[in-house]
Image (spheres, rainbow, N blue to C red):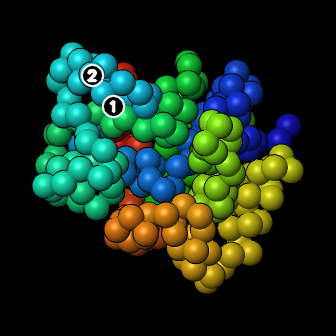
């Protein structure tokens, strides 16, 4: 039996959640990176499917969480920008709306869900293996969305998934093997590829180059964020 499977986006979660022992959601720019930064500082992150802001505020009040603002928010407020979360205090509970990472995280159903990125790939792989107990692991690159809401594969998520798959060191489906091989093939060009990707250029152009830099701090974190009782916390 193959031990690691990879499928993309929401359809990938739906295809894998009943077949695997653990799911790993990979949204490098920037949900998974933001969660890693917050959780590594002792915060908890409640994912909220992207949608109505009023509904998010009500949900945040219900669980006693601080609602994270859009990335473009001014005034040093917490947002989806990982750079904004570098000073979050231990014990803080954040509600993080996200059109990709949060939505996919909440679609995992009864299957344990981790979120991983380039910062914590080895830690996430280690915890996923332990939790799977010999079972199959699903690694899901989130991708981005085209204007018609169809999936746009994103190379930063392919490479982030590949990093986790590489550290898992387990037999792979063809799709997972290609992701792992892509990560190894990128080598010392990985940072340049991600900075020059569509997502990387978009963030830099909007003034969020620091977010890309933080996402590229490879293995800077030894935390594996696990979704438990509705929030990501350190496993």
Determine if residue 13 is in view.
Answer: yes
In-image side of 178 versus 26 (left or right): right
Up-down relation of residue 161 to residue 142 (above or below): below
Identify the residue under disc 2: 54
Residue positioned 62% across, 36% down in the render: 149
Determine if residue 227 is in view.
Answer: no
Residue positioned 73% across, 61% down in the render: 180
Q: Residue 110: x, y in percent?
A: 55, 18
Which numbered disc flags the more N-terminal residue, 1 or 2?
Answer: 1
Residue positioned 36% across, 24% down in the render: 52
Q: What secondary structure is found at the residue carrying circle 2?
A: helix
Q: Nearer the viewer, residue 37 or 150?
A: 150
Q: Nearer the viewer, residue 200 or 235?
A: 200
Q: Which mark is residue 66?
A: none
Furthest residue to the front? 147
Q: Dot 2: within a 10 Å radius of its alpha carbon, few (fewer than 14), some, or many (20 or more) residues? A: few
Identify the residue under disc 1: 46
Closest to the camera, between mark 1 and mark 2, is 2
Up-down relation of residue 153 to residue 7 (above or below): below
Image quadrant assignment for residue 5: top right
């Amino acid at each position: 039996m193959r031990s690691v499977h990879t499928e993309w986006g929401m359809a990938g979660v739906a295809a894998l959640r009943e077949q695997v022992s653990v799911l790993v959601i990979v949204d490098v720019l920037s949900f998974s990176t933001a969660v890693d930064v917050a959780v590594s500082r002792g915060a908890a992150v409640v994912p909220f499917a992207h949608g109505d802001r009023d509904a998010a505020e009500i949900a945040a009040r219900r669980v006693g969480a601080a609602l994270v603002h859009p990335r473009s928010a001014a005034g040093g407020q917490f947002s989806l920008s990982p750079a904004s979360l570098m000073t979050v205090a231990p014990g803080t509970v954040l509600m993080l709306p996200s059109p990709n990472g949060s939505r996919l995280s909440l679609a995992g159903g009864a299957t344990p869900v981790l979120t991983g990125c380039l910062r914590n790939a080895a830690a996430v792989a280690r915890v996923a293996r332990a939790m799977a107990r010999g079972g199959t692991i699903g690694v899901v690159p989130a991708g981005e969305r085209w204007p018609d809401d169809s999936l746009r594969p994103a190379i930063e998520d392919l490479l982030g998934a590949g990093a986790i798959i590489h550290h898992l060191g387990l037999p792979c489906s063809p799709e997972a093997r290609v992701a792992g091989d892509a990560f190894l093939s990128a080598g010392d060009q990985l940072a340049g590829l991600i900075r020059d990707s569509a997502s990387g250029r978009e963030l830099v152009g909007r003034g969020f180059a620091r977010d890309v830099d933080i996402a590229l701090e490879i293995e800077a974190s030894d935390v594996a964020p696990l979704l438990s009782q509705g929030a990501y916390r350190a496993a």
